[in-house]
Image: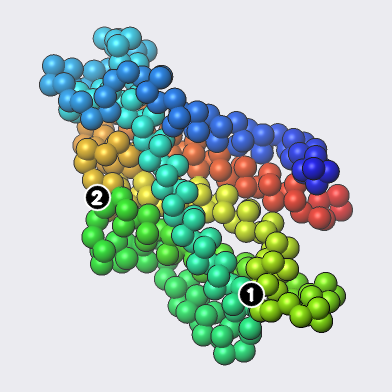
């Protein structure tokens, strides 16, 4: 409890981090309260209300606050339900990356030698390619879909976590408390997961927060290219792709999905920076 209080005291001093936290809280509320905020069906089409202007534009209607798309679907509703999809993408993708990255990083750092060499060379091979290119390759192999996009983003995120955990394990495993546990008869699994791993949690939390923002952005990019969420899924990248064909006639259509992607990435990045600063033992230096 004292550690949490100390963390919160440091975290709230960072105004940018608080802004990021409020943005993330806003996104979670949008996802949870989507049916309450809007009573429209995100998939329902209405050919009588195609590309209705947003409420602030001349000719806009309060029935559709952010207007409708090219199929007459309410944009605000699709944005709200899109928040659910984007948060799910982040959770699943980061979850995959954390699970396998932590496992490989622990094995590489703890056992060292050949195990370390094989795992790290594999991670280096994955890092040698641009992440978006590797994601596209994986999706092309598995096939375009939202599930495969999440798997691809998760796989590509593994090396980042593996390298961070490995570095933390190398720094921790020679310390006295680990030696004491060995003397007391602790086995490899207990040493790895019960003794060393808890002391590697801080960089993992920071990396996961940053990775969440990257996952949402990469998923939106895949959907924009037609490799991620498929129609009629209300995903922000797919909405942005649909709006691009009306860039000259109805440029306002790109603003809602583009703004949500921007806010999400900015919010999680600011939150991650704040967590890193608050947990940094050298922050007072």
Residue 120 showing in the rendered view: yes
Q: Is residue 251 above or below residue 110?
A: above
**Helix or strand or loop: what does disc 2 sit on?**
loop
Number of numbered discs on residues: 2
Mark closer to the observer (1, 2):
1
In this rendering, position of residue 236 left or right of residue 195: left
> Of the numbered discs in the image, which one, if any, rests on residue 189?
1
In the rendered image, residue 97, in percent from the top left (x then y), is placed at 49, 61
Q: Is residue 210 above or below residue 109?
A: above
For residue 222, side relative to residue 177 (left or right): left
Q: Secondary structure at mark 1?
A: helix
Instruction: Please give the residue where the numbered disc 2 appears in the rendered image.
Output: 226
Q: Can you name the residue that lies furthest to the front here?
A: 185
Image coordinates of residue 173 in percent, x first then y, are 74, 76
N-terminal-most mark, 1 or 2: 1
- The answer to whether residue 168 is visible is no
Determine whether label 1 and label 2 are within 8 Å by CB: no
| Residue placed most toward the observer, 33 or 123 | 33
Residue for point 69% across, 66% down = 194
Residue 98 in percent (x, y) is at 53, 60
Residue drawn 18% across and 17% down?
Answer: 49
Residue plotted at (47% across, 79% down): 122
Q: Compared to 230, does 259 lie above or below?
A: above
Which residue is pictured at 75% across the width and 72% down the height?
172
Q: Which mark is residue 197?
A: none
Residue located farthest toward the bottom when viewing the structure as drawn: 114
């Amino acid at each position: 409890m004292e550690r949490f209080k100390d963390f919160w005291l440091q975290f709230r001093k960072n105004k940018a981090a608080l802004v990021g936290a409020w943005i993330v809280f806003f996104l979670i509320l949008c996802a949870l309260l989507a049916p309450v905020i809007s009573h429209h069906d995100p998939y329902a089409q209405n050919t009588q209300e195609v590309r209705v202007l947003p409420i602030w534009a001349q000719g806009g209607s309060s029935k559709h606050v952010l207007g409708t798309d090219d199929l007459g679907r309410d944009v605000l509703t699709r944005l709200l339900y899109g928040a659910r999809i984007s948060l799910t993408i982040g959770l699943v993708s980061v979850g995959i990356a954390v699970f396998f990255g932590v496992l490989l990083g622990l094995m590489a750092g703890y056992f060292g030698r050949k195990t370390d060499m094989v795992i790290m060379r594999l991670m280096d091979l994955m890092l040698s390619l641009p992440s978006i290119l590797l994601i596209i390759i994986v999706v092309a192999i598995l096939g375009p879909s939202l599930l495969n996009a999440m798997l691809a983003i998760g796989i590509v995120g593994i090396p980042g976590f593996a390298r961070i955990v490995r570095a933390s394990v190398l720094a921790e495993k020679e310390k006295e408390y680990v030696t004491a546990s060995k003397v007391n008869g602790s086995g490899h699994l207990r040493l790895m997961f019960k003794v060393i791993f808890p002391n590697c949690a801080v960089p993992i939390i920071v990396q996961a927060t940053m990775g969440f923002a990257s996952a949402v952005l990469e998923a939106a990019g895949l959907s924009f290219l037609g490799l991620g969420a498929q129609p009629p899924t209300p995903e922000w990248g797919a909405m942005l792709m649909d709006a691009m064909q009306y860039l000259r006639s109805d440029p306002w259509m790109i603003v809602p999905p583009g703004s949500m992607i921007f806010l999400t990435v900015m919010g999680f990045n600011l939150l991650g920076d704040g967590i890193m600063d608050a947990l940094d033992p050298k922050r007072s230096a």
